[in-house]
Amino acid sequence: MKKVSLLLIMGAMTTQIMAQQPQQPQPQQQSVQPPQQQRQQMKPEETEDWSRRPAIVTPGKYGAPPSDAIILYGGPQDIVNWVHENGSAPVKWTADSALTVVPRTGGIKTTRSFGNCQLHVEWRTPSVVSGTSQGRGNSGIFLMGLYELQVLDSYNNETYYNGQAGSIYKQHIPLVNASLGPGVWQTYDIVFTAPKFQTNGELLKPAYFTVFHNGVLILNNVSLRGPTEYIGIPVYKAHESKLPISLQEHGNPVSFRNIWVRELQ
């Protein structure tokens, strides 16, 4: 009997102690709303971005450059924007309404340097067809003087495909051949992203090209393996963030006109 009473007393004391202890709040489960329900509860203004007002640019009419373009060549007065590829000698090409290669005089480059950019170039191969493959209307546009977009008479002119007009020479074949015939003015509209390097010289991000040839997309944000090489595999070497644009002299009297550039971030 005493044993039973003792057990009853101990049980009552335990119950009293537990009753005096503060109750821990039970965590409430938060319901996750599906995206559709979240959208329904949002206001239209919550997804409006007012952080940066785009600058106003007036487009050029009938192939003219836009209002924020830097004119590299629009006539003989703009020859001052170019120098010989060696950086010191004057340009020896013919400069009138167009810049025309004079064979065996060397290439030319801009006096200013550029990195990320939009570049417009009009070009024309000779109307009198001479030579075949790489020997027919050959030149090149080198972004930063290192990364070549091929210029070539590729109208009924067979050559290796990563060397035809619109190719990133020896690296990328154009999606299509949009070439016009010899002696006809053609256009390249280029968006170029310069490569980036770490402080130790290691490559952080490769160069990229997007190119429209005569209004047709032929290269869509392609990455480069390195600078243009005629022989061997390209390898990146660290260089400045901005360098001159170069036009190649390859022995053929190719002409260029209406060259303008827009610097991009």
Image (tube, helix red, strand yellow):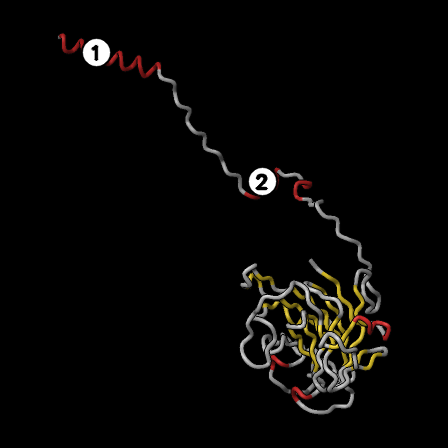
Q: Is residue 92 above or below residue 77?
A: below
Name the residue: 62% across, 86% down: 159
Q: Residues within 10 Å of mark 1 (few under 14, many from 20)?
A: few
Q: Which residue is mark 2?
A: 38
Please tell me whether mark 2 sits on a helix, a strand or a loop: helix
Name the residue: 31% across, 14% down: 17
Examine the image and state in which quarter residue 172 appears.
bottom right
Q: Nearer the viewer, residue 196 or 193?
A: 196
Residue 144 lies, in percent from the top left, at 67, 69
Residue 49 lies, in percent from the top left, at 69, 45
N-terminal of the pair, mark 1 or mark 2, is 1
Q: Which mark is residue 8?
A: 1
Name the residue: 82% across, 82% down: 94
Please give left or right for residue 245 compared with residue 24 in the image: right
- Asked if one can make out residue 214 in the rendered structure from this viewpoint, the answer is no
Q: Quick check: marks 1 and 2 in contact, CB under 8 Å?
A: no
Q: Is residue 150 above or below residue 54?
A: below
Q: Which mark is residue 120?
A: none
In the rendered view of the protein, which quadrant contains the C terminus? bottom right
Q: Nearer the viewer, residue 226 or 210?
A: 226
Q: Is residue 126 above or below residue 197?
A: below
- Asked if one can make out residue 232 in the rendered structure from this viewpoint, the answer is yes
Please tell me whether mark 1 sits on a helix, a strand or a loop: helix
Badge 2 amino acid: Gln
Name the residue: 85% across, 77% down: 97
Please give left or right for residue 265 compared with residue 69 in the image: left
Examine the image and state in which quarter residue 11 appears.
top left
Cα separation, mark 1 vs mark 2, equals: 57 Å
